[in-house]
Image (cartoon, rainbow, N blue to C red):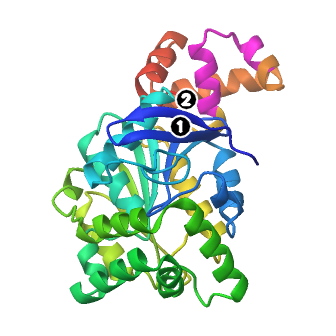
């Protein structure tokens, strides 16, 4: 799976992005440092993206200072990172988004949802904390940042055990290759420093989108209780505990993470419509007759008619025009 790379200008500098799959737009932020190409070869990340792409248009991007994005002069502050993510969504024409954010990417996704409630349909965060200061004592955080800045290789070894449960020699080598390709030591250290210094506790109560908080029970990078705190601070959030110790969502039982994320993100709050009924509703909004819908979906005309009747009943509407109005108002734009 070779990504097709495009670029857009953001307040943090020029950013590289890529899309794959079809369906509602899903913006993916994997945390800390990124590499659009190399990450696809790391552990089960490529398989994870493919699973999401079965239902969504997955939007990935390289953080400012990372991968194929501008490396020099990028503004790495947290606020500029949030603005860069929103600029990528604008570049692909995604007026309404679903978000998946992992670790530091969870902070970013939650902040975007809180600050731009009109843009976010649903939010899933994984392995996230509300405040980076809770990840380790101040002297430990300072030492890790200094080690990454002074010696990228040693910094990677120090962090590998937190990201990957019981890493093998091959795991360590693959992790090191990806991290070195994703960013310079200076950028990696600065992004880690920003993460440690970010506290979004005050923002989380403003998140209005449907939210699921995924967290592995023995996460070595971000303790489970920090994820539980996030779930208590976001109104109506659902906490989904998962087994495992790896902090990377695409290491270990990645399929369980993908299943929980896609299941939640694919739900349509308050409608009761199935995915097929949502598809039929969209075709009704395009002006297709039952016969045309049947041909498009390769089903019997009677089946198409039944779907339309079920949609009318579930939405409590009487006409196809009313179905079209509902679609315009409630469905995310792909």
- CA separation, marks 2 and 1? 5 Å
- 108 lies above or below 179: above
- 125 lies above or below 284: below
Q: Which residue is mark 2?
A: 334
| Horizontal side, residue 300 vs residue 202: left or right | right
Give coordinates of residue 199: x percent, y percent: 21, 65
Q: Which residue is mark 1?
A: 25
User: Could you tell me which secondary element the residue under label 2 belongs to?
Assistant: loop
> Where on the picture, by quarter, is residue 232?
bottom left
Residue 152: in magenta span: no
- 203 lies above or below 283: below
Extent of the magenta region: 277-294
| Badge 2: residue crowd in 10 Å (few <14, some 14–19, many ≥20) | some
Number of on-image labels: 2
Q: Residue at x 48, y 62 (%)?
A: 33
Mark earlier in primary sequence (2, 1)? 1
Q: Residue at x 71, y 14 (%)?
A: 290
Q: Residue at x 60, y 12 (%)?
A: 286
Give coordinates of residue 197: x percent, y percent: 23, 68
Give coordinates of residue 154: x percent, y percent: 50, 85
Residue 284: in magenta span: yes
Q: Residue at x 30, y 88 (%)?
A: 140
User: Could you tell me which secondary element the residue under label 1 belongs to?
Assistant: strand
């Amino acid at each position: 799976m070779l990504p097709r790379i495009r670029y857009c200008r953001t307040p943090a500098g020029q950013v590289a992005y890529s899309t794959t799959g079809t369906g509602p737009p899903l913006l993916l932020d994997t945390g800390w440092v990124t590499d659009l190409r190399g990450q696809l070869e790391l552990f089960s990340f490529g398989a994870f993206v493919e699973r999401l792409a079965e239902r969504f248009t997955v939007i990935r991007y390289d953080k400012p200072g990372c991968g194929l994005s501008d490396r020099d002069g990028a503004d790495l502050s947290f606020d500029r990172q949030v603005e860069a993510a929103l600029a990528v969504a604008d570049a692909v024409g995604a007026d309404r988004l679903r978000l998946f954010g992992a670790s530091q990417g969870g902070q970013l996704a939650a902040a975007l949802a809180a600050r731009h409630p009109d843009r976010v349909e649903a939010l899933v965060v994984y392995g996230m904390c509300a405040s980076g200061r809770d990840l380790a004592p101040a002297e430990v955080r300072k030492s890790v940042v200094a080690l990454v800045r002074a010696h990228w290789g040693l910094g990677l070894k120090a962090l590998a055990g937190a990201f990957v449960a019981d890493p093998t020699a091959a795991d360590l080598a693959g992790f090191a290759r990806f991290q070195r390709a994703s960013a310079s030591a200076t950028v990696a250290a600065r992004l880690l420093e920003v993460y440690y210094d970010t506290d979004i506790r005050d923002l989380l109560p403003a998140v209005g989108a449907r939210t699921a908080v995924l967290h592995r029970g023995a996460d070595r990078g971000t303790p489970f209780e920090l994820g539980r705190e996030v779930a208590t601070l976001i109104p109506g959030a659902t906490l989904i505990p998962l087994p495992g110790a790896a902090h990377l969502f695409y290491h270990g039982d990645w399929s369980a993470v993908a299943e929980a994320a896609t299941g939640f993100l694919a739900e349509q709050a308050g409608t009761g419509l199935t995915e097929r009924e949502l598809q039929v509703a969209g075709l009704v909004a395009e002006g297709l007759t039952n016969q045309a819908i049947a041909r498009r979906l390769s089903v019997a005309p009677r089946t198409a008619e039944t779907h339309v009747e079920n949609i009318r009943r579930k939405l409590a509407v009487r006409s196809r025009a009313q179905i079209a109005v509902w679609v315009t108002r409630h469905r995310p734009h792909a």
